[in-house]
Image (spheres, helix red, strand yellow):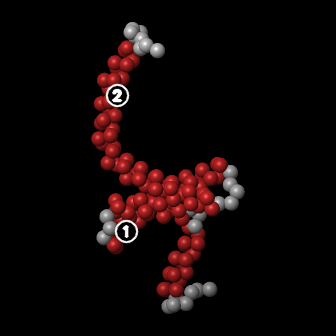
Amino acid sequence: MPEPTTTSAAAAAITSSSSQTGPGLAALFVAFLGPLAGPYALIVFAALAGSLWPLSGADAMTRTAGAWLMLRCTLTAVVLTAAVSNYIQTRYEVQAGEAFAPVAFLIGALGNGWRPLFAAVTAAFSRIIGGGKANE
């Protein structure tokens, strides 16, 4: 089909006004927010990939419950990844930016396993404080 040779005045006005401000604003947003959005995008995608692991192991679950599980795992990873990565940087001399993806993946993969993790940490602290014996 051949291209139209004429354009209506309203369409020409919309096209010309959006083409003048659109790329300028987009370039400005990318310039200012690009360095911030990159690490967060990395964390979100790694956490989403990690959250598929507990989702695949979950018993019969509705789509809504599965979506909430993935959202919960992803948001937990977004909140905790920077702190854990900074700890890894100070302790093991690995750059925090390089640790974002594996840390976010592991936090996302932990899924609903936080209670056993906290129970193990509590048992370890009770052994340390109790002089080698677990408080029963």
Place of residue 26 in the rendered image (x, y in percent of width and height, measured from the top left): 34, 34
Q: Is residue 94 above or below residue 133?
A: above
Counting residues from the N terminus, which is met first, the one under dot 1 or under dot 2?
Answer: 2
The answer to whether 13 appears left or right of 65 in the picture is left
Q: Which amino acid type is marked by label 1?
A: Tyr
Q: Which residue is mark 2?
A: 22
Q: Which amino acid type is marked by label 2?
A: Gly
Q: Is residue 10 visible?
A: no
Dot 1 surroundings within 10 Å: few (below 14), some, or many (20 or more)? Answer: some
Q: Is residue 93 visible?
A: yes
Residue found at the very far front of the displayed protein: 1
Quadrant housing residue 43: bottom left
Q: Give the CA distance from mark 1 to mark 2.
A: 41 Å
Dot 2 surroundings within 10 Å: few (below 14), some, or many (20 or more)? Answer: few
Q: Nearer the viewer, residue 17 or 122?
A: 17
Q: Secondary structure at mark 2?
A: helix
The label number, if any, that marks residue 87 in the structure image = 1
Place of residue 18 in the rendered image (x, y in percent of width and height, measured from the top left): 36, 23
Quadrant housing residue 61: bottom right
Residue found at the very far right of the displayed protein: 60
> Nearer the observer, disc 1 or disc 2?
2
Query: Could you tell me which residue is drawn at 37 percent across and 69 percent down?
Result: 88
Q: Secondary structure at mark 1?
A: helix
Place of residue 114 in the rendered image (x, y in percent of width and height, measured from the top left): 56, 67
Place of residue 96 in the rendered image (x, y in percent of width and height, measured from the top left): 34, 62
